Amino acid sequence: MSNILILINRILCAFFLNFLFLLSMPVYSWAHGYAGKRFFPTTISIEDPFVADELSFIFNYLKESGEGDEPPVDAFELPVEYTKRITPHFGISIGDDFRRLDPVGEGAEYGFGNLEVGAKYQFFTSAPHESLFSVGVEAEIGGTGNSSVEAESFSTISPALFFGKGFGDLPQSLEYLRPLAVTGVLGLNFPTRSSTTTSTIDEETLEIQREIEQNPITFSYGFAIQYSLQYLQSFVKDVGLAAPFNRMILLVELPFETGLNRGSGGETAGFINPGIIWLGKYIQLGIEAQIPINDGSGKNLGVLGIIHFFIDDIFPNSLGRPIFR
Amino acid sequence: MIKTFVIISVISVITIFSIGQKRALSHAMFNHSEPKVGETISNCPKQVRIWFDSPLEPSSSTVRVESESGNRVDNFNGHVDLSYATILEVNLPCLSPGTYQVSWKVVSLDGHSTNGSFAFTIE
């Protein structure tokens, strides 16, 4: 009973605080994901180079290969992220992911990963050159998820540089390359604990066995190479594309991560993710294949999808605008 | 517990603004135009018309046409069509052969701004 009262109290507090918070908002509206006439979509694997009011639901299915005595695992993840602009160029984010891990021959485990919070500042935008630069930091808060689905007990702090560049400024002779754009990220991931010790009791000998897992600092980098049919149709050449093709972006995402120390120096894992994004008025949909680049990344093909809501378009006069002008 | 609070907080904000949201608009995005983007035509067009996917704010939406040398060649009357608020248009004198650049900037009724440009050629 007391838990229910606490829950009701929290709901009321949340409503009241948010109501006061939003009453203080000025009447203001701003664009999302634009640099000049270039619209940068939200990509699935590579973090956006801009700040925006948006809500993303991603799904990811991948059959992870087993190692040693460990069986292969059917891994399904459903990350959710909400980002909110505080000013037109500064935003914060919060996210989590629901996971279902199903080792072959064993029972499936369900649960949430660790809570992730972040902040990003878009410090450079060039409309004529369709370019954006941002810096940001994200923190995965250890111990806030379920260890049964491999949520870590330690936190990871990840500062990063984000960029986006459209090629609309190419000369006329290369006009069919103008719809191209690249976004990318360069970042480091610092775990707050250098190693994790797991203790288990051997059921036969009753001896305590300790397994020490190193938590290396890693370098994350990746690129999303995009060809926008919407840009082609609207600004370069009307080639007669009808809906839904005139709102599509063809892309390949290339997310990589390289270990820097603690026994994993130089080891790189990553994927090549070709796919399609479709832009609607209020939502964006996308689907990608997920191809591992080496054995360390996996041996099986995965699939990624996104349903993304443009909060600034859905709620232009309230939730979808920056708090401060 | 922190997670429950955060999730409830986000849902409550969305709920508050889902209730009473009178009309959802969005960025006005280019749909098509006459002359078409990148088109080569043989006649002398009387105007450039651009269709968008959302109604436009007339006082803040504009379009202009320039020659290759950067001189403005339209009749300086770029405006939103009063009958169809999704159409932006500007009248043209009879232009000589050449390539012309159309530049537009529009604001949708909710205040979101978008812009763009494209070329067409008269042979």
Image (tube, rainbow, N blue to C red):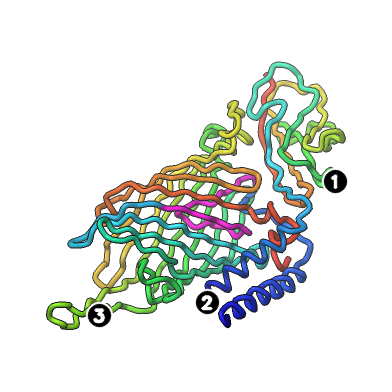
Could you say whether the residue bearing mark 3 is in a helix, strand or loop? strand
Magenta span of residues? A37-60
Horizontal and vertical percent for residue B10? Answer: 62, 66
State yes or no: discs 3 and 2 in contact (Cβ < 8 Å).
no
Q: Return the residue nearer the eye: A229 or A20.
A: A20
Can you tell which mark lies on residue A199? 3
Q: Which residue is mark 1?
A: B59
- Bin the neighbour count of mark 2 within 10 Å (Cα to Cα): few under 14, some 14-19, many 20 and up: few
The quarter of the image holding the C terminus of chain A is bottom right
Nearer to us: label 2 or label 1: 2
A4 left or right of A316 in image: left
Question: Is A167 located above or below residue A138 in the figure?
Answer: above
Q: Amino acid at mark 1?
A: Ser
Question: Is A180 located above or below residue A316 in the figure?
Answer: above
- Bin the neighbour count of mark 1 within 10 Å (Cα to Cα): few under 14, some 14-19, many 20 and up: few
B87 left or right of A211 in image: right
Q: Return the residue nearer the eye: A35 or A63.
A: A63
Q: Residue at x 77, y 66 (%)?
A: A26
Q: Return the residue nearer the eye: A110 or A124.
A: A110
Q: Which residue is mark 2?
A: B1
Chain letter, disc 2 residue: B
Question: Is B95 located above or below residue B9 in the figure?
Answer: above
Q: Amino acid at mark 3?
A: Ser
Q: How many marks?
A: 3
Could you say whether the residue bearing mark 1 is in a helix, strand or loop? helix
Q: Residue at x 86, y 33 (%)?
A: B83
A299 left or right of A150 in image: left
Q: Return the residue nearer the eye: A96 or A24.
A: A96
Q: Amino acid at mark 2?
A: Met
